[in-house]
Image (cartoon, rainbow, N blue to C red):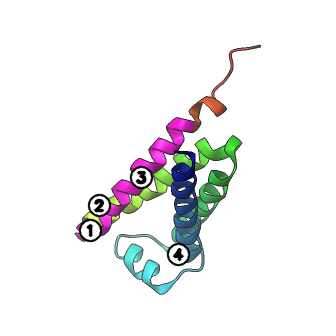
Amino acid sequence: MKILFTIVLVILVFLAISSGITKILLLQQDVDFFGKYGFTNPVIIAYGTAQLVGGILLIFKKTRFVGAIIVAATFLISLVVLLMDGNIPVSFATIVVTLLLGIVAKQNWKSTAPTGTG
């Protein structure tokens, strides 16, 4: 089971970081797609930066919970835009990935939860 979790985690990190980089670099496909829904270039760059930072935080056990929450939030925004665009197949894939991020967050909640000492 640990091997499967590691494979899923690697895929999630790759998706988050690659999605973030494409937005930071303002690739035309992202600019055109998000621009249709009012995203300006600075907003797209900030959005990509959040995805990149979240993806990096996913790598480390101590920050994995926060990273999963950040990436899930950005993917949920993408999901809304995809649904507005009528792109159901990619929307479904985004839902699956977001659910996987939820599982990662849940499994790592204990490592970031306060211990109650103090």
Residue drawn where x is 70% and y is 41% of the image: 62
Q: Quadrant of residue 94?
A: bottom left
Three-letter amino acid code of the residue under disc 2: Phe
Spot occupied by residue 74 in the image (x, y as percentages of width and height): 48, 57
Q: Secondary structure at mark 3?
A: helix
Of the numbered discs 4 and 2, the one sitting upstream in the chain is 4
Write the start and end of the magenta stretch as one range: 84-107
Is 61 included in the stretch rendered in magenta?
Answer: no
Q: Give the mark nearer the N terminus: 3 vs 4.
A: 4
Query: Identity of the amino acid at label 1?
Result: Pro
Residue at image mark 3: 98
Which residue lies at the image location 58% right of the left edge and 53% below the top edge?
6
In this orientation, which residue lies closer to the viewer: 93 or 52? 93
Height in image: 28 above or below 86? below
The answer to which of marks 4 and 1 sits earlier in the sequence is 4
Q: CA distance from mark 3 to mark 4?
A: 25 Å
Q: Mark 1 — residue? A: 89
Mark 2 and mark 1: Cα distance apart in space = 5 Å
Label 1 neighbour load within 10 Å: few <14, some 14-19, many 20+: few
Whole-number angstrom distance, CA of label 2 to CA of label 3: 10 Å
Mark 4, residue position: 41
